[in-house]
Amino acid sequence: MTDPHIPTSPVDATTGNPPAVEMLDVWKRFPGVVANAGANLRVRRGSVHAVLGENGAGKSTLMNVLSGVYRADEGEVRIDGTPYHFRTPADALDAGVGMVHQEFRLVPSFTVAENVALGACDRIVRRSAVESAVGALADRFGLATEPDRPVWQLSMGERQRVEILKALWRDARILVLDEPTAVLTPGEADELGAVLRHMADDGRTVVFISHKLHEVTGFCDEATVLRGGRTVAASLFVADTDATELASLMVGASPVVTERPPAREVGEVLLEVQDLRCPDDRGLAALDGLNLTVRSGEIVGIAGVAGNGQREMAQTIAGLRPVESGSVQLCGEDRTDATPRQRFADGLGYIPEDRLGVGLAPRLSVTDNAVLRTYGRHRRGPFLDAAGATDYCHDLVDRFGVRTGPLEEPIAGLSGGNLQRLLVGRELVDGPRVVVAAQPTRGLDVQGVKAIQDLLVSEREAGAAVLLVSEDLDELLTLADRLLVMHAGRIVAEFDPTTAERYVIGEAMIGHSSSASLASSDQGSSR
Amino acid sequence: MTEASLVGLLEATVSFGALLYLAALGEMVAEKAGILNLGVEGMMAMGAVTGFVVALHSGDPWVALLAAVAAGAAVGLLHGFFTVVLGAEQVVSGLSLTILGLGLSAYLGRGSVGRPAGAELVGVDWGPLTDLPWAGPVLFGQSPLVYLAVVAGFATWFVLWRTRLGLAVRAAGESASTADAAGHSVAGIRLAAVAVGGGLAGAAGAYLTLSLTPQWVEGVVAGRGWIAVALVIFGAWRPGRVAIGALLFGLTLALKTRLQTFGVDFSPILLSMLPYLLTVGVLVVISIRSRNRPSPSPAALGIAYRREER
């Protein structure tokens, strides 16, 4: 054992038990990426243990090794002191390790009971018997669910309960949850915390991946921090540390923090949405009378729980989704029925949340992607002016600091941060008057987040109207001049980000307009 | 139209329907596990030639049927090897299989063209039931493969919807990563399903050369494998609805040769398009209904599964 952070004695001093989970010097490489570079983890039985780290720190990879999804290139996994070499998730389940993945492993067309029974059941499946057994298990752990409902009808919070039920059904003693609160409202996250606490008190062990510090300080016993694929702090007692220390461990020596941009005079209304209605992919109302305005020189932030119409709002403003009624005005002109290209010509820059797929074409080259919007300018007669397009792309790449290989190579090999710089650069290079940015920093590392945020702020300085949709409340509170909360397809509240209380915003996000709520999930600041 | 010709039409409808049903059930099992196999036509041809040739040499129709099932399963497994083990594009592999099966069957059967069958699968003796008016010839005068198709339909329904194995098969077709995380071998399930599917297609092929028209000619399958593929969609991946569709499509096949004798002036060529037109109609209905509910098509159909892909 060379890592100074790992205590040499593997035995729990108080109980004499070996740790429930031990992972020693785990390495896992993917083509072009080292996801785990000697990561260590030691989890005490009966505890709730947080695994913390930035995006790309190797948390999910380490947990996938623990649950048998990935096989480690090097390193050792021990469960209750016994070494294991998991080859499949089934092996891990047999050893008592159950994982709740970030993307749920559920069959949408199956009922709750069928999804649970998929893990283990008799050869002949008797539907009613399975349903009542699943219902009984759910009741025992306080996980409200309806066993006979198909999963596609359930909310994200309910789906997560089904995932936890699946692990409990297989009698998992060690439950691994990969960013379980990412899809939950603040209230649901608190409920989940209580359920996990209950399971730990029941003698089970919970490993909880997160990058939200207030959750770690809220209901975890110990925390392990990963950075760049290795363990930088192992099994810290949460009671002995605080959010600031954890934050600096996560981001390294010098945390990069975007400062709140100074206040600025706002100008004329450049984007106005009136009483907008449109259906979602399932035909249900996604936007239900949406009203908002964004003025020149301001960033308007949109907060909300995922799936409350944010996606559809960005798409309707960009012209990618037909509206049922209502209007969209760009720079004072009614553009409700205009094509995406007309809106681009009006000065709309659109940064879609789905950056590979909607924003960029993965198999096209850097140059082709860079000129997707403007290829009409680079032509020689009926042909594309390849040299002109390459020059243009060179300028773009230089100006926005995109690190790429050869420009004629497909962009699929670029990192998330560089893809986003390319996309944002393409949309901002002409100085748009209106910018719609949907989740522009999601999944980026610290430097990438900072770079994109700085670009949005400089657009604001240049007098653009910026509409920023984000799931990161901290980002919205830092950048936005006004913060709107979206719920069930409409704006339900507006806050001044400099004075708003996080828990009041959280209440508005789940549709409770009363500010007199007692629930506060966030006494500890996470900034 | 006489009573006798109507009975004949119904008899042929059931007979063609069972033929289509066997092949479509096989395709449905493979698709339920997530493997689209467009090689049904080729697998049927291989079953047809194997059944006929083995019957010539052994003289035992049941041995010939088993050989046909094995031949279909082997071709199915070849598709499984390409798509499951090597992760090849399923459409490309399936189409190649059709070409391969048609060519190879023509080659293997080149010495058997025009020869009388070595053995035939003859009707089951249902005793007095066979003498019933209407029901006798239509229901009880059929080839044993018709009854096999009925049994296979119930067995498929029971296994897929009432057993643990079926749950795992359907999960592999809906969300392979979910089935994997639940501890089921996606590759094993898919290989087995595509082999079962091939075996049923092989049985359908044997039905052609051991029962329906007991002789071998090149091209004996005559596009019925493609109708079986369409039938799975028409039946929305449910054995009961596929059975109804099989009878409906069987009726169009039966009518094709009889329209003229009924004195109806309608082109049999247009009639043979009907199964495809009906299938397109069902696809439209499915896509309209799917706006607010999941499509009945297995969600992971046609998608290769690699556990460590990210």
Image (cartoon, coloured by chain):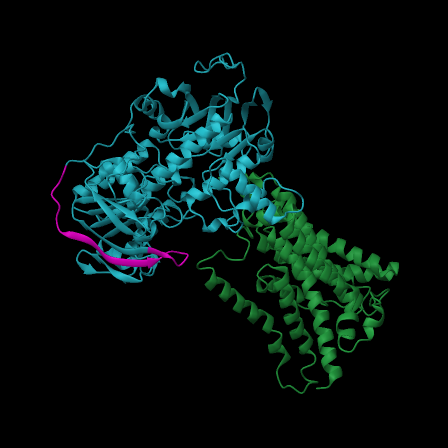
Chain colours: A cyan, B green
Q: Residue at x 34, y 19 (%)?
A: A241
Look at the image and tell me whether residue A317 can be seen: yes
Q: Residue at x 73, y 86 (%)?
A: B2
Measuring from the top left, give residue B115's x and y in whole percent: 84, 68
Q: Is residue A316 left or right of residue B23?
A: left
Name the quadrant containing residue B71.
bottom right
Q: Is residue A418 left or right of residue B6?
A: left
Between B239 and B222, the one nearer to me in the picture:
B239
Eyeballing the image, is B92 above or below A496?
below
Name the quadrant containing residue B125.
bottom right
Count of numbered labels shown in the rendering = 0
Measuring from the top left, give residue B46's x and y in whole percent: 73, 59
Q: Residue at x 50, y 51 (%)?
A: A150
Eyeballing the image, is A453 above or below A348?
above
Q: Residue at x 49, y 23 (%)?
A: A46
Residue A355 among magenta residues: no
Eyeballing the image, is A122 above or below A324?
above
Q: Which residues are magenta?
A: A263-286
Measuring from the top left, give residue A226's x and y in whole percent: 41, 25
